[in-house]
Amino acid sequence: MTLLDLQSMETPKEETTEAAHLTGSVDARSTAWLRRRGLAALLRTAPHHAARHSPGEVSARLTAHATGAGTVPAAVATAATALLPPLGGLVALFLIDVWTALAFLAGVPLLALLLRAFARASGASVSRYQQVQLALAGRLAEALAGARTIAAAGTAEREAARILEPLPELGREGRRTWRIYGATMARTSALMPLLLYVVLGVGGARLTAGALGVGGLLAAVRYAGLAAGAGAVTGRLAAVVRGRAAARRTAALLDLPALTHGEREHAADGPGTLELRGVRVERAGTAVLRDVDLLLPGGTTTAVVGRSGSGKTLLAAVAGRLTGCDAGQVLLDGTPLEELTAAALRREVGHAFDRPALFGRSVGAAIAFGARPEPAADAVRAAARAAGADPFVRRLPEGYGTPLADAPLSGGELQRLGLARAFCGGRRLLVLDDATSSLDTVTAREVEHALAHRVRARTRLVVTHRASTAARADLVVWLEEGRVRATGTHERLWQDPAYRAVFGAAGEPGPAASGEPAARGAVR
């Protein structure tokens, strides 16, 4: 065997390897681009828009479906490349003899119909298959989040059956997809040889009539065979169909509306006065907050109270622009919040929640997370002391350097770390959304004292269910069915039986009921 023979054998392998490398590179880059875009869209949108998709669905869309969608560019390019030889063969067929070329073209509409029917049927089946995948992922994520409840209820087997319930449908759709693919391949495999026989018959007739020579007939048959390679595009079309279906799933994340921000880097100077003017917020076409007008003086603590579903959490989100208004404006020291950049907004406004999520490599990093500028170690410890978290953090194996994964936290401890994180930020406004609900009464009062004396935020907005917290606030906003029913001090509002009912018959007594002196103004 000569060197030339060896080269002729090795070159196709090298070309195949290079093509595979190029295809894999394009797929990986496309997938990474989709995942970055999808994740960015999730983080840019308002929380209620992101909540449209369950964690399991989001995971499936950003993993399996993004991977499938990422194959589309390379699949389209491969399919287009695969069509070039058949098109070249058809052009050559026209140059040799128009009638043999027209004979071949007579079967092309039938091929197009077959491929179109395949794309439709396969696309519908693949779409249903992927929808079932989303349902499975969503159920699995729900079960993992509620693992303790499932264990306590002793329903593990029932939950496993519920999670796996869609599997038969998944199998049916998978088999249906392959049946559609197999049937289409069989039809196209039968159509292409038939077209070759038609070309051979027409060419023979042309040869008999003297319009085509023997060499021309042989060439026509060879080029017709090359053109018949168009039938092999079915496999590549299947990859495009699967990728397009996956792309539609991933695009649902890309289509999430972004919470817009302005270009101002600083709000107007002031004490942190928060004003809501005619605020209206709708969800699913229903007004959840209606005609809210509030003026919260700078440097004060305002408690927001109301029954469940009255709109307290939504009001807190609007006040800190975690979500936008459908009508009206929210202003901080006279500057509309929507005019601030995202960085400026988060620098001026801090948040703490009833169920905080912690991010960072260590406990100290979790407290400093998101603060602008990044706080020093002393500032982190001061925030932890203000939130009542310093004692238990110091007891951790490595103190503030303890990795979060190695820091077993109770609900109250987790909430205190969330408060400490909020205390590190929010120069003008601090929004606490039921952020002390897991704290005992003594710790809650220590936090309220810290809010008055050791937190840099000038103005505090506190969503609470505690009558004692409302009693220590400067101002109370009483919400009912998305409207402000009344504002005033806790002591004055307590005279209203409907206000007392907000805290429940067995709730904490207010100052008017207990004889305890009102502590209005104690929390500043």
Image: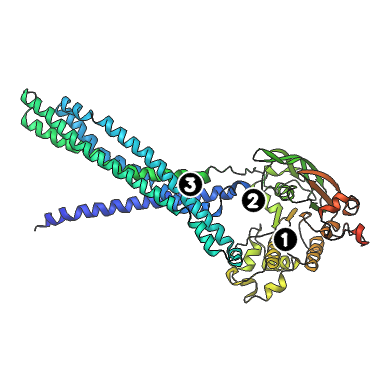
Asked whether 239 or 382 is in front, the reply is: 239
Earlier in the chain: of badge 1 and badge 2, it is: 2
Could you say which is closer to the camera, residue 489 or residue 117?
A: 117
Q: Looking at the image, which residue is at 76% across and 56% down?
A: 457
Please tell me which residue is depicted at 68% across the width and 75% down the height of the picture. Answer: 394
Residue nearer the viewer, 498 or 101: 498
Q: Nearer the viewer, mark 1 or mark 3?
A: 3
Q: Is 4 above or below relative to 384?
A: above
Q: Give the labeled residue for mark 3.
A: 250
The amino acid pointed to by label 2 is: Ala
Q: Look at the image and tell me in which quarter the C terminus lies.
A: bottom right
User: Residue 70, percent across and down?
Assistant: 41, 48
Q: Residues within 10 Å of mark 1 (few under 14, many from 20)?
A: many
Residue that mark 1 sits on: 423
Q: Amino acid at mark 3?
A: Thr
- Mark 1 vs mark 2, foreground winner is 1
- Is residue 308 toward the left or the right of residue 467 in the image? left
Q: Earlier in the sequence, mark 2 or mark 3?
A: 3
Q: Which quadrant is the N terminus positioned in?
A: bottom left
Residue 427 appearing in the image: no
Q: Position of residue 25 (x, y in %)?
A: 37, 52
> Looking at numbered disc 1 in the image, what kind of residue is underneath it?
Phe
Q: Is residue 465 visible?
A: yes
Numbered circle sitting on residue 489 = none
Q: Secondary structure at mark 3?
A: helix
Query: What is the x, y in percent for residue 136?
Result: 49, 54
> Disc count in the image?
3
Q: Which residue is mark 2?
A: 343
